[in-house]
């Protein structure tokens, strides 16, 4: 999978440099229910304009909402950003040093963003599960995890598979594979690097 990703990875600004916990938190709020391409047009200028939680907490909601136009759900995103920033400030900025279960409780974040902070800001071996990653694992390991695994079991299974040496690349590869190859509609199994071990592929291509 990593070998495939080296040849086919998607290029985004936030993948080209180390990110702080704050920058990852902002990124994940912006990425919700929209495309990475749309976020790529907003994220660099947003971080330049709002480089930390103090800059977000100190501006009106309407300013943030206007800045986020083009992504959709700008009012919700602005609220999530404001709530997150105010909470971190109330904790004297210690929240971004917290463990995953504490980050999950931060307003505006939740389980996915909490794990993303651990991976992309700290280089730890976690697997944030979005729709693309869930689809890849559910298809490849269908026989191992079943058709309806409990959320906690699914998360533990995914976390256990993350390579400890390259967790960022591993997660980016999963996301890109799900977005461009293991698609919800018309998956491109014929070019998928995981086809040899994929339960979904085997079931739908019994002669392979």
Image: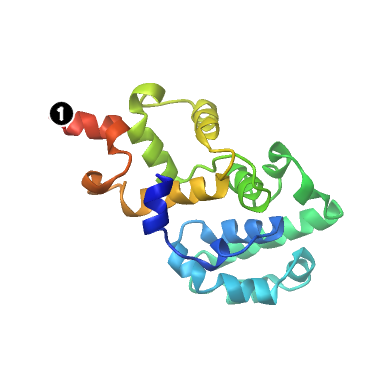
In the image, is 105 to the left or to the right of 193? Answer: right
Residue at image position (45%, 61%) is 34
Quadrant including the C terminus: top left
Helix, strand or loop status at disc 1: loop
Dividing the picture into quadrants, the one containing residue 93 is bottom right
Color theme of the render: rainbow
Disc 1 designates what residue? 206
Mark 1 Cα shell of 10 Å, populated few (<14), some (14-19), many (≥20): few
In the image, is 207 to the left or to the right of 81? Answer: left
Quadrant including the N terminus: top left
Q: Position of residue 204 (x, y in %)?
A: 18, 33
Dividing the picture into quadrants, the one containing residue 194 is top left
Residue at image position (59%, 73%) is 44
Residue at image position (55%, 61%) is 15
Q: Where is residue 40 in the image (x, y as percent from the top left)?
A: 50, 69
The residue lying toward the viewer, choosing from 196 and 172, is 196
Residue at image position (30%, 47%) is 184
Q: Position of residue 43 (x, y in %)?
A: 57, 70
> Can residue 199 be seen by looking at this rendering?
yes
In the image, is 52 to the left or to the right of 177? Answer: right
């Amino acid at each position: 999978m990593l070998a495939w990703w080296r040849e086919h990875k998607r290029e985004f600004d936030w993948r080209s440099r180390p990110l702080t916990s704050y920058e990852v938190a902002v990124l994940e709020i912006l990425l919700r229910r929209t495309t990475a391409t749309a976020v790529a047009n907003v994220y660099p200028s947003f971080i330049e304009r709002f480089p930390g939680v103090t800059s977000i907490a100190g501006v009106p909601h309407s300013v943030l909402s206007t800045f986020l136009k083009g992504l959709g759900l700008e009012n919700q995103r602005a609220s999530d950003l404001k709530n997150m920033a105010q909470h971190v400030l109330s904790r004297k900025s210690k929240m971004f040093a917290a463990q995953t279960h504490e980050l999950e409780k931060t307003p505006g974040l939740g389980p996915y963003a909490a794990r993303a902070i651990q991976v992309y800001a700290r280089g730890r071996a976690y697997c944030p599960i979005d729709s693309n990653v869930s689809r890849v694992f559910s298809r490849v390991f269908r026989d191992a995890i079943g058709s309806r695994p409990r959320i906690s079991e699914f998360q533990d299974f995914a976390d256990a598979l993350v390579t400890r040496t390259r967790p960022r690349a591993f997660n980016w590869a999963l996301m890109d594979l799900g977005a461009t190859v293991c698609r919800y509609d018309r998956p491109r199994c014929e070019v998928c690097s995981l086809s040899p071990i994929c339960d979904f592929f085997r079931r739908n291509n019994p002669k392979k």
